[in-house]
Image (spheres, coloured by chain):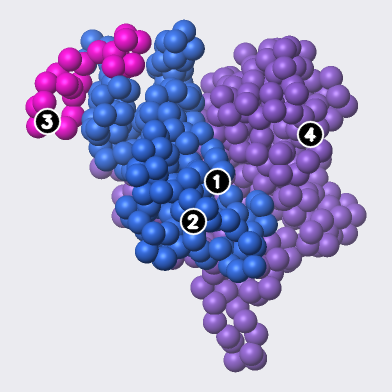
Amino acid sequence: MISESLLQPEELAAYRLRALYRQYGYRLYRMATFEDYDLCVRNRDFLTGDRFITFTDAGGRLMALKPDITLSVIRSGDDKPGSRQKLCYNENVFRPDRASGAFKEIPQAGLECTGDLSEADIFEVVTLAVKSLSLISDDSVLDLSHLGLLGALLDGISPDGELRREVARCIATKNTHDLEMICRRQGISGDRLEEIVFLAGLYGPLSEVLPRLAPYCQSPAAKDAFGMLGRLSRTLENEGFAARTRFNFAVINDMNYYNGIVFKGFIRGISEGIVSGGQYDPLMRRMGRDSSGIGFALRLDLLEELPDGMKGDSP
Amino acid sequence: MISVALPKGRLGEQVYRLFEAAGYPCPALLTGSRKLIFENSEKQIRYFWVKPLDVPVYVERGAADLGVAGKDILLENDPDVYELADLKLGRCRMAVAAPEGWHDTGEKTLRVASKFPRIAERYYRRIGRDIDIIHLNGSIEIAPLLGLSDVIVDIVETGTTLRENHLVVLNEILSISARLIANKAAYPFKTGEILRVTEDLKGLVNKE
C-alpha cells in the first residue's frame, strides 16, 4: 500500500489520475521514448513547433525524443468499424520553452479515446477533464468551445485562408478592437459586425451563455455545434460540474487538426492553462484513420506552482 | 485584488492617468518614490512599474493580472495573453524607411535593419520579398547611412529623426498604440474584476 504522504504533488496527482481513468475503463499506455522524426515533422503545427531533439538510431533512421503522446496513440490504435480504444498515460515529453527556446522535459498525465466514438464517449472525456482538475484543486475551471461555431463564424467573414487565420487569432486573444477593424476592411458593418464582436467576446457559465448564443446559430453547422453544447451542458450539470465549466469562444486549437469540442483547464494560482484537449478527427484523417479521436493532457510540472499544495495533500 | 504592470516612462504615466480617470487611483504612484509596488486597497488594485519590454512577461507568467504594452512589443514577442482593449495612447507607426532617392530594384536580397526582426520578417514574407534581417538594438537610422543595410523597419513618431538623417518613409507596415493585456489563467477566476476595469477604460477611451 502506498502512503500518499510520501509522494510529491506531481506523483500524487499522477497516482490519483490513473486511478480515476482506470475507473472509466482507460488502460495504461506505455509509449517508446523515441518517435519517428518524419511523423513529427509532418505534424509540426499540431505539435506547435518544429524543433525536436533528434538523433540517428543504429539502423540509420532519424528519430526524435517524443514531443507529444497523441500521435503515438493514434498510430498504435485500430481503425476497424465498431472498435474503440481508451488509453491513459503518464509520460514525459520534450519541447522547447517558448521564451528561452531551451528544451524542457515536461511530465504529463492524460488520456486519449479513439475509434468509433459516440457523443457519450466525447462527453465522458470532457467530464474526466473536469474531474481531473477537481482532484487537484477545488478552485478550478474548464473553459470550452465548439470549433463548429468558429467555423460558421469564419465562413460568414471570408473564404480566404490568411484572413480566417487573422480573425481566429483575434478571437483567440479576445482582441475585438482589431477584429472590428479587419471586418470593416472586409465591408462588414452594422448588425453583422456587432454580432461578430458579441460572439468573439462571449464568456461565462454554459447555462448563461447558451441562451444568448442561440439566436446566432442559424447555419446547419452552427446549429449542430449549438445542440451538442446544450447536451454537454446538461451532462455537466447532472455531474454537478456546471459551476466549474465556462463557455469561452477564445479556446481555439488549430482547425487543421481539431474539430468539435475543444477545452482548456485552469487552476487558481497556476499561471497558465494546465489542461489542454479536444476532438481531433482531422488529425486522424491526416494519419490515415477514418474514425474519431478526443483526448487531453494535464501538465504535471505546473503543480509546483500550487500555492497550498494539492487538495487533500497530507501535511 | 487586481495587479497591473505599467510600463515605466512617459507612456506609463499617461496610462496611469487613464486608470485614475477611470476610477482606479493610487496617488502614491506619481510621487517619485523609489517604491516599485503601489496599492489602493479600497479599490482593490495594485500597480507596479516595469520596463515596457517586460510587461508581457509579467502578465504571461501571472505575476500581473493585467498590463499595458505597445502593439509593437506584442507583435514582436507574441506572448500568450488576451488583448482586451486598444487604449489609443502612445500612437505611432511601424514603417519601412530608406535614404532619400533610394529605390528597390528587386535584383538583390534586401538588407533590412530593425529592432523588430519578427515584424519585419513577417511583412516581407507577406509581400514575397527575399530579405536579410540585421537585428540591431538601437540607433537603427544609422544602418543605411553606413551601408550596413538598404532599408530600416522602425517606429516613426514625428518623423524628425528620419528627416534629419535624410531618410524617407517608403511604406507603413502597421499602426501602433498601447494595448491592455490580461493573463489567460487569471481571467476565469477574476472575470468580473478584469471586465469591469476593461469596460471602464474602454468607456473613457471611446469618449475621447
Disc 1 marks a residue whose amino acid type is: Leu
Q: Residue furthest left?
A: B33
- Give the magenta range: B17-39
Q: Nearer the viewer, residue B179 or A258?
A: B179
Secondary structure, mark 4, is: loop
Residue denoted by label 1: B170
User: Can see residue B78?
Assistant: no
Q: Nearer the viewer, residue B57 or B106?
A: B106
Residue at 64% in and 17% down: A198
Residue A204 in percent (x, y) is at 57, 20
Which amino acid type is marked by label 4? Ser
Q: Nearer the viewer, residue A139 or B9?
A: B9
Q: Chain of mark 2?
A: B
Q: Compare marks 3 and 2 and give the one earlier in the sequence.
A: 3
Q: Is residue A150 left or right of residue A34?
A: right
Spatial separation of the CA atoms under disc 3 and disc 4: 50 Å
